[in-house]
Image (cartoon, rainbow, N blue to C red):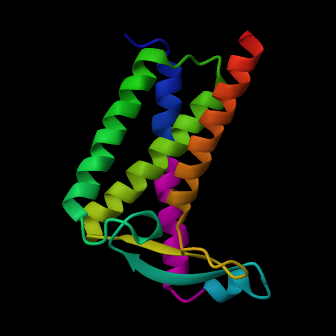
Amino acid sequence: MIKDKKALVFILIFSVFLILFESSVRKIISLNQAHLLMSGNPILKFQIVSNYGAAWGIFQNSKIFLIGFAILILILSLFYVLRNLCFDNKIEILSFALFIGGTLGNLIERLSLGHVVDYIKIVSLNFPIFNIFDTCIVCGILLFIINSLISKRNAE
């Protein structure tokens, strides 16, 4: 049973927009125009890396597992959205839109390229190179957790 179709439509539209946006950013980078965007930036730089694993290099060369896991997570997320999400909770909708869009984007890259293209490097930290999809996944999870904690606290 769908609680609110508007929430699902928003998530799907946001996911498609996110994928198109990330694709455009990567095209700019791959055309060696990144220096125009990042010139003089002491915090971030673009460095293209093919990632055959997951976060922090885990599950290297486990393409089938990572594809299956992403599909499972997408199915479970969409099931949750269809069963529980209400359009009134805009933070929760945004958290799922970010999470689903990021997961779907990485899945599409892994299916089409055989790997995920990472390209954002934080210069001052010894931190793995990542992409916009990774950022969306993490932000979506954090938003969901924070929103859940705040909702639980307000209910008490």
Residue at the far left: name it.
64
Q: Picture quarter containing residue 74?
A: top left
x 38%, y 78%: residue: 50
Query: Residue 95: where, in percent of width, then height?
Result: 59, 37
Q: Picture quarter containing residue 78?
A: top left
x 80%, y 88%: residue: 40
Q: Which residues are magenta?
A: 17-33
Inspect the magenta stretch and tell me whether residue 27 lies in it.
yes
**Above-or-below relation of 32 to 15:** below
**Above-or-below relation of 155 to 10:** above
Quarter of the picture holding the C terminus: top right
Q: Is residue 62 left or right of residue 108?
A: left
Query: Who is closer to the viewer here, 23 or 133?
Result: 133
x 37%, y 10%: residue: 1
Magenta segment main secondary structure: helix
Callout count: 0
Q: Is residue 30 left or right of residue 151?
A: left
x 25%, y 72%: residue: 61
**Above-or-below relation of 110 to 26:** above
Query: Who is closer to the viewer here, 4 or 148?
Result: 148
Q: Picture quarter containing residue 80?
A: top left
Query: Residue 32: where, in percent of width, then height?
Result: 55, 89
Query: Residue 54: where, in percent of width, then height?
Result: 39, 64
Query: Residue 58: where, in percent of width, then height?
Result: 38, 66
Q: Is residue 107 left or right of residue 153?
A: left
